[in-house]
Image: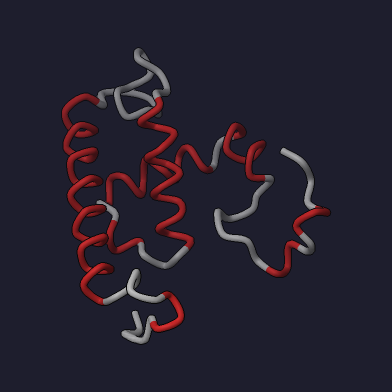
């Protein structure tokens, strides 16, 4: 990442970026630990007997965003595999319409995008 964040004021200093990276590594590391401990079957963090939780929704979205922003190195490998299963599923595709979590000019004008 470039060290010139001047257009963002004092928010994106190298120190702030490093702190945010540390926080997300710790958070996703804790989630990966729970996944290893409780995930015995199926798709979701705590297995299919528990089913999808709010933590699943937030985790898959965060992992997807990090990957879309080319920051996959911050994500534990098992959470990448876990997110792949969910983002390949019909629920994710029905919400995203196959789009990334980051707007791309090729999507066209925002106001003309299909409603979700």
Q: Quadrant of the C terminus?
A: top right
**x and y, in percent, of residue 24 in the image:** 26, 53
Residue at figure coordinates x 40%, y 48% from the top left: 62
Residue drawn at 19 percent across, 59 percent down: 22
Q: Position of residue 2 (x, y in %)?
A: 35, 84
Q: Quadrant of the N terminus?
A: bottom left
Q: How is the model colour-coded?
A: secondary structure
Q: Quadrant of residue 72?
A: bottom left
Between residue 91 and residue 17, name the one nearer to us.
17
Q: Residue at x 65, y 49 (%)?
A: 98
Residue 44 placement, left or right of 16: right
Question: Of residues 74 and 9, which is closer to you in this image?
Answer: 9
Tell whether 93 sits left or right of 6.
right
Looking at the picture, does residue 96 appear above or below residue 6?
A: above
Position of 36 relative to 22 (above/below): above
Image location (x, y in percent) of residue 91: 59, 32
Give the camera-side residue of 40 and 12: 12
> For residue 4, what is the image quadrant?
bottom left
> Which residue is at the far front?
9
Give the number of callouts: 0
- The quadrant where residue 3 appears: bottom left
Q: Position of residue 84 (x, y in %)?
A: 44, 45
């Amino acid at each position: 990442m470039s060290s010139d964040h001047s257009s963002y004021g004092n928010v994106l200093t190298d120190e702030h970026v490093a702190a945010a990276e540390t926080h997300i590594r710790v958070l996703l590391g804790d989630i990966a630990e729970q996944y290893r401990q409780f995930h015995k079957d199926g798709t979701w963090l705590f297995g299919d007997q528990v089913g999808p939780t709010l933590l699943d929704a937030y985790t898959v979205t965060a992992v997807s965003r990090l990957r879309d922003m080319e920051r996959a190195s911050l994500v534990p490998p098992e959470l990448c595999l876990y997110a792949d299963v969910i983002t390949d599923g019909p629920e994710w595709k029905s919400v995203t319409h196959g789009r990334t979590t980051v707007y791309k000019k090729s999507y066209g004008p925002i106001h003309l995008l299909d409603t979700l």
